[in-house]
Image (spheres, rainbow, N blue to C red):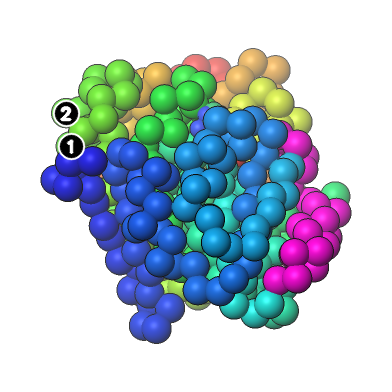
């Protein structure tokens, strides 16, 4: 590939630092990532949709290793403990030793489960992320949050376990359905909205190119978002403070996703609507102005993302779902709000009346 289009961003974590490579053709550039596999064994974790498309691109790179695959059925429902058990059994059958490596080839579901399996096998072995969705490239593959869902809630079992490298080959996006692609763009907007106004302005200028999947714009957007997230992770790896900002829009978004039984909205779509609600709540609390909310709404719409609460959802049940959020403490709502584009803040003790009024106004289309 043209070296000029390759981006390499370091997640700086001392001896556990790792590169995120972003570019075209990277899955086939075996020499680049093969050097990251230290031992004799590799388990490729993927799913029934992604493996037929992209496993052939990496197979030759695994020559000389003892390797096998563990394939999930497609879907969030399969990010569960039973499949972690099966992945660990696959590592056992492979005879994987402590220097073995798990290769996660897929979206966030595959990456989260593969990373958690790597964290569990012999108390932690290497893993490499090969994200194939935009969401995974700009968010889930970077930062070391791994885990699975439990019947009582999403992402409730997990570990911080950083990968050895992230290989984001944008060629994989050519087969990604439009809706999934746009959901990934929401996570790009999120980074800019939280802490990088210049990036937000760049997104405004390049919204058409991004909506049309122009490669140069896509690589630049991924790189900017990853650079922003890498900085946050380097400063606060285990979310003692600043990293919580990355949840802008998530408390509203999770409530919307849950109210839709995880069928009506993709995660990124919930985040898009949730970010706008967070902006509108900030406005109601006097933290930001209407121009900030308008700017966010316009960008989300230009990228083809939803901005309205889906029909049939009511304010009170949504508030009830928000009360269950992991970030709350001592029975008080703790939300990520903003003082305008690029200036997000963690705000504790948010009054439920203002939240309810924000939801009610949004449902009424005000
Ligand atoms: P996903 O992994 O379910 O992928 C979305 C869909 O796209 C799936 O049907 C998948 O099979 C398909 N797909 C993947 N790559 C493809 C390709 N190149 N071509 C065609 N189809 C392809 O969903 P996602 O949006 O990538 O990730 C969502 C998951 O990520 C959730 O479980 C969420 O909790 C998790 N997540 C984790 C973090 C983190 O920090 N660890 C952050 C955000 C989200
Ligand atoms: N996706 C939020 C985080 O990585 O912290």
Say which mark, if any, is on residue 202.
1
Q: Confirm if mark 2 falls within 8 A of ligand 2.
A: no
Which residue is label 2 attached to? 205
Question: Residue 97: where, in percent of width, then height?
Answer: 68, 77
Viewer-proximal residue among 165 and 299: 165
Question: Residue 194: where, in percent of width, then height?
Answer: 34, 51
Q: Compared with residue 9, is residue 356 higher up or lower down, i.e. above or below?
A: above
Residue 290 occupies quadrant: top left
Residue 336 belongs to magenta span: no
Residue at 75% x, 71% y is 95
The crowding category of the residue bearing disc 1, from other C-alpha atoms within 10 Å (few below 14, some 14 to 19, many at least 20), is some
Magenta stretch bounds:
73-96
Q: Is residue 111 left or right of residue 242?
A: right
The crowding category of the residue bearing disc 2, from other C-alpha atoms within 10 Å (few below 14, some 14 to 19, many at least 20), is few
Residue at 41% x, 25% y is 174
Q: Is residue 17 left or right of residue 306?
A: left
Q: Compared with residue 251, is residue 19 higher up or lower down, i.e. above or below?
A: below
* Quadrant containing the N terminus in the rendered view: top left
Q: Are marks 2 and 1 in contact (CB under 8 Å)?
A: yes
Question: Residue 123: where, in percent of width, then height?
Answer: 69, 80
Q: Secondary structure at mark 2?
A: helix
Give the farthest residue toward the bottom.
15
Distance from disc 2 to disc 1, alpha carbons, whole Å, reads 5 Å
Name the main secondary structure of what is drawn in magenta: helix
Question: Residue 26: where, in percent of width, then height?
Answer: 36, 45
Residue at 17% x, 41% y is 2
């Amino acid at each position: 590939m043209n070296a000029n289009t390759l981006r390499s961003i370091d997640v700086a974590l001392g001896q556990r630092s790792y590169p995120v490579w972003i570019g075209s053709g990277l899955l086939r550039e075996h020499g680049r990532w093969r050097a990251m596999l230290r031992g004799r064994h590799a388990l490729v974790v993927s799913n029934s949709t992604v493996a037929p498309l992209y496993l052939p691109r990496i197979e030759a790179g695994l020559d000389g290793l003892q390797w096998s695959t563990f394939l999930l059925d497609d879907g969030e429902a399969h990010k569960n403990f039973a499949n972690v058990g099966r992945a660990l059994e696959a590592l056992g059958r492979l005879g994987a030793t402590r220097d073995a490596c798990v290769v996660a080839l897929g979206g966030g579901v595959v990456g989260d489960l593969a990373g958690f399996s790597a964290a569990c096998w012999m108390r932690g072995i290497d893993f490499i992320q090969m994200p194939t969705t935009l969401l995974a490239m700009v968010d889930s593959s970077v930062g070391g949050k791994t885990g699975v869902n439990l019947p009582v809630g999403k992402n409730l079992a997990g570990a911080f376990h950083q990968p050895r490298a992230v290989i984001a080959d944008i060629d994989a996006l050519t087969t990604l359905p439009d809706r999934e692609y746009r959901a990934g763009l929401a996570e790009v907007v999120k980074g800019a909205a939280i802490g990088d106004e210049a990036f937000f302005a760049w997104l405004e200028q390049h919204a058409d190119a991004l909506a049309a999947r122009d490669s140069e714009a896509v690589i630049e957007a991924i790189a900017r978002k990853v650079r922003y997230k890498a900085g946050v992770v380097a400063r606060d790896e285990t979310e003692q403070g600043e990293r919580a900002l990355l949840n802008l829009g998530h408390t509203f978004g999770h409530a919307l996703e849950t109210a839709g039984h995880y069928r009506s909205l993709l995660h990124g779509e919930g985040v898009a609507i949730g970010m706008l609600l967070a902006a509108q709540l900030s406005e109601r609390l006097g933290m930001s102005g209407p121009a900030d909310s308008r700017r966010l709404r316009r960008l989300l719409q230009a990228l083809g993302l939803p901005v309205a609460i889906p029909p049939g959802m009511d304010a009170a049940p949504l508030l009830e779902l928000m009360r269950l959020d992991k970030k709350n403490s001592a029975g008080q709502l703790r939300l990520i709000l903003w003082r305008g584009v690029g200036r997000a803040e963690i705000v504790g003790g948010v009054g439920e009346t203002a939240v309810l009024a924000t939801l009610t106004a949004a449902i009424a289309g005000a």
